[in-house]
Image (spheres, rainbow, N blue to C red):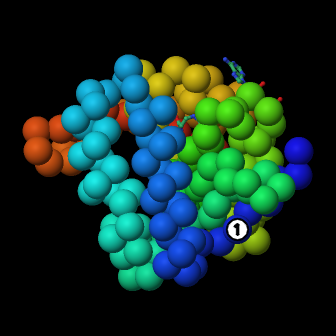
Amino acid sequence: MNITFEQVVTEKQIKVLANTANVVWHEAYKGIVAMSQIDYMIEKFQSFNPLFEAINKNNYLYFLIKSDNNVAGYIGLHEENGKMFLSKLYILKEYRGKGVSSKTFEFIENLAKEKNLKSVWLTVNKNNNHAIEVYKHKGFVVIRKQVADIGNGFVMDDYVFEKIL
Ligand SMILES: CC(C)(COP(=O)(O)OP(=O)(O)OC[C@H]1O[C@@H](n2cnc3c(N)ncnc32)[C@H](O)[C@@H]1OP(=O)(O)O)[C@@H](O)C(=O)NCCC(=O)NCCS
């Protein structure tokens, strides 16, 4: 499988990103958080306007993960305090279990090393068992737990994982 990473820059690409997020977040969080919370989180964080702001005002780097010419998923990254925050990692259902995430971690770690960053860190829902197993397998360790209030009576109940490069 030929995997490439296409940086999201144009409005057309942001629309593709938002559409992909809508599909993959419903797949990923079904059974983990309530549907009303999934819809709320997508609107607040991963619809066109917040994505446009994150990319154009807040220095977030988003990449579409492409398999040949098809979108297989996406990542969102943010450099902070000498570390790379892996803010988003979402692979569409039909592309999971095929080595896409390993190529994606390689890409992220190489980018972080090029920028002389000392680690990659991320947050993951405490009930997202598959993602947690994959992160551990890739050398990430839990450094703390965090409960974030995201408004409307919703919280994100997460582990924070980090991998020193
Ligand atoms: C989390 C996610 C990115 C992982 O990608 P994936 O394609 O499912 O991962 P894979 O099944 O290819 O596994 C990746 C690696 O972890 C290993 N792995 C998978 N399940 C494992 C388990 N239960 N225990 C140990 N290792 C495991 C695989 O063997 C593989 O290793 P290798 O490539 O080094 O040989 C993907 O499942 C996803 O996008 N899920 C939905 C969205 C989501 O939850 N994102 C995370 C939000 S924080």
Type of amino acid at the residue the image marks with label 1:
Glu
* Farthest residue, direction right: 1
The quadrant the N terminus occupies is top right
Residue at image point 69% right, 64% down: 112
Q: Residue 15, position in %: x, y?
A: 48, 67
Q: Residue 56, position in %: x, y?
A: 44, 82
Q: Is residue 118 visible?
A: no
Question: Under 8 Å from ligand 1: the CB of mark 1?
Answer: no
* Farthest residue, direction left: 153
Give the quarter of the image for residue 61: bottom right
**Drawn side of residue 77 relative to residue 127, left or right:** right
Badge 1 element: strand
**Drawn side of residue 111 relative to residue 46, left or right:** right
Q: Residue 62, position in %: x, y?
A: 56, 66
Q: Where is 2 relative to 97, above or below?
A: below
Residue at image point 52% right, 52% down: 20
Q: Is residue 47 visible?
A: yes
Characterize the local packing of mark 1: few (<14), some (14-19) or many (20 or more) Cα atoms within 10 angstroms.
some
Residue at image point 49% right, 78% down: 11
Give the quarter of the image for residue 31: top left
Q: How many labels sit on residues? A: 1
Nearest the viewer among 134 and 139 is 134
The quadrant where ligand 1 appears is top right
Q: Which residue is mark 1?
A: 6
Nearest the viewer among 24 and 138 is 24
Residue at image point 48% right, 32% down: 27
Q: Where is 54 relative to 77, above or below?
A: below
Give the quarter of the image for residue 83: bottom right
Q: Where is 107 relative to 139, above or below?
A: below
**Drawn side of residue 38 relative to residue 71, left or right:** left
Q: Residue 80, position in %: x, y?
A: 48, 67
